Image (tube, grey):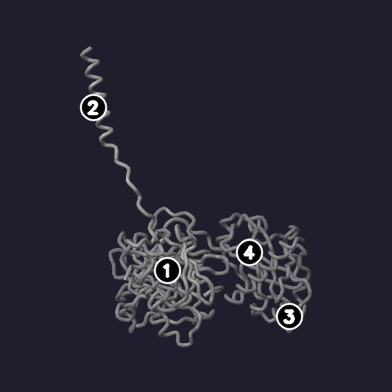
């Protein structure tokens, strides 16, 4: 092994550990987005797994194995079959990156013997286990819970909702929350008849400050509009979208500034999630159905 | 013979016309002194954001967006350059975040043909590309700020100042 490859592996491991520390995912793939016909790495942070046996797996010196059944489970006799619960197939042994993080490299279409579209439609499902999964690991079986990694198909062509700057990866921007982000809405691609002839749009944004489902700060929660919030134009006038003409609307803002008055603890903004809606909510269809979330570059300020 | 005479006459008239239209050579005049040009106080008036991740752009709006309204929400910053002492000083305001310190020294990479402006302060030099020349007669100073994360450029901003 050359010094360069060693450096690359260490760097990948460090990146993986950094990513999981920052984003709190138990399982993910790299690169992001992936090419299903090219090599990918499946990462699992055993410290983030919730099943009772996971802590023991995170610290064990024993070999660990991937057990996978989706997009396709290989039948008995296939060289990449999982093996048995008491004796995993050695071909599915994972490598350890340190700090309880393990990884497995594969080309998805070759490994699972499926088409690229199957990789996008059926998530990768797996768990990590000891060779004998039935052993006792702290009072539970020596395995993690079932883990799922959804692979999103690349988007091409015009999009109804998009950002400027564009996303660098699937849902991550290269900018930080101290930069300007502009959210665009292209009404020409709207399928909701209630919005097609309207022009009073507001981009109701909330900022994520933690990994929990409710770890947001907001002036109005666009995903849970209460009766008192119906007059969006009065509640969040600063979120009015500018009409750029040709059916396009946009809102430019600096997230750190936008939420400064309510971010009393000075928490770091990890992402913004938004919903485009009309200035006054009269009925359920007065908003765009999608509510995308864009993650910021958290490596720098 | 009559036809030949006509042709000769036509050629003669044509030559005289072409020569008459030839522009007279002009002198370019002395080279503009850009140290002289940048001297004085400038007010930040416009900010364009550049998306550095776009690999294929079909129109300018694919890569550049005017974000002035989002950034200049209060009184804009000002920057003064002194051509003699080679010092600069910033009056804080909207847009100050693009600069590391409020005072220090400044220099061009090349005084005759500058391509970038360097601001020196205790935290180290900051480099700003010149988007256009800044001659004494120019009303605008336009510089480019690259925001870096390690060795990666994450985003760029074009900062447009007007002479105060």
Q: Nearer the viewer, mark 2 or mark 4?
A: 2
Same chain check for tags 4 and 3: yes
How crowded pointer 4 is (Cα within 10 Å; few <14, some 14-19, many 20+) is rated as some
Q: Nearer the viewer, mark 4 or mark 3?
A: 3
Q: Position of residue A4 (x, y in %)?
A: 71, 62
Q: Position of residue A228 (x, y in %)?
A: 33, 84
Q: Which residue is mark 4?
A: A70
Q: Earlier in the sequence, mark 4 or mark 3?
A: 3
Label 2 marks a residue whose chain is B
Residue A47 lies in quadrant = bottom right
Seen in the picture, residue B49 relative to A56 is either above or below; the reply is above
Q: Is residue A221 visible?
A: yes
Give the numbered dot on residue B13.
2
Residue A293 falls left or right of residue A105: left
Secondary structure found at label 4: strand
| In front of the other: B133 or B128 | B133
> Which percent across, then down, holds residue B47?
38, 67
Question: Does the rendering let one see residue A163?
Answer: no
Q: Secondary structure at mark 1?
A: loop
Indicate the chain on which mark 3 is placed: A
């Amino acid at each position: 092994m050359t010094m360069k490859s060693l450096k690359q592996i260490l760097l990948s491991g460090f990146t993986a550990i950094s990513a999981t520390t920052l984003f709190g995912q138990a399982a993910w793939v790299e690169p992001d987005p992936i090419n299903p016909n090219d090599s990918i790495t499946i990462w699992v942070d055993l410290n983030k797994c919730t099943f009772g046996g996971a802590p023991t797996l995170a610290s064990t010196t024993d070999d660990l194995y991937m057990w996978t059944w989706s997009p396709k489970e290989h039948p008995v006799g296939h060289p990449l079959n999982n093996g048995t619960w008491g004796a995993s197939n050695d071909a599915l042994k994972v490598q350890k990156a340190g700090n309880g993080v393990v990884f497995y490299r594969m080309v998805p279409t070759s490994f699972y013997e499926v088409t690229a579209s199957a990789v996008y439609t059926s998530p990768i499902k797996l768990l990590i286990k000891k060779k004998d999964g039935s052993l006792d690991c702290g009072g539970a079986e020596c395995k993690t819970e079932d883990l799922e990694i959804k692979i999103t198909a690349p988007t091409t062509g015009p999009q109804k909702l998009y950002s400027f700057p564009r996303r660098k990866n699937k849902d991550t921007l290269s900018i930080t929350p101290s930069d300007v982000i502009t959210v665009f809405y292209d009404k020409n691609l709207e399928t909701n008849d209630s919005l097609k002839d309207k022009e009073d749009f507001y981009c109701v944004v909330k900022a994520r400050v933690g990994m929990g489902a409710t770890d947001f700060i907001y002036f109005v929660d666009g995903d849970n509009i209460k009766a008192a919030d119906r007059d969006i134009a009065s509640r969040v006038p600063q979120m009015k979208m500018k009409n750029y003409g040709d059916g396009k609307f946009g809102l430019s803002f600096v997230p750190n500034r936008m939420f400064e008055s309510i971010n009393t603890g000075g928490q770091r903004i990890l992402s913004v999630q938004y919903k485009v809606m009309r200035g006054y909510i009269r009925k359920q269809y007065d908003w765009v159905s999608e509510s995308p979330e864009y993650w910021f570059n958290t490596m720098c300020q | 013979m009559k036809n030949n005479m006509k042709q000769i006459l036509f050629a003669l008239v044509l030559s005289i016309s072409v020569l008459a239209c030839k522009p007279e050579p002009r002198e370019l005049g002395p080279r503009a002194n850009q140290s002289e040009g940048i001297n004085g106080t400038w007010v930040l008036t416009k900010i364009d954001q550049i998306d550095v991740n776009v690999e294929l752009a079909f129109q300018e709006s694919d890569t550049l967006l005017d974000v002035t309204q989002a950034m200049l929400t209060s009184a804009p910053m000002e920057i003064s350059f002194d051509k003699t002492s080679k010092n600069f000083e910033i009056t804080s305001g909207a847009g100050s975040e693009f600069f590391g310190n409020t005072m220090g020294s400044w220099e061009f990479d090349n005084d005759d043909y500058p391509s970038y402006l360097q601001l020196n302060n205790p935290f180290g030099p900051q480099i700003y590309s010149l988007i256009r020349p800044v001659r004494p007669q120019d009303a605008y100073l336009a510089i480019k700020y690259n925001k870096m994360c390690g060795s990666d450029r994450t985003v760029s901003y074009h900062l447009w100042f007007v002479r105060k």
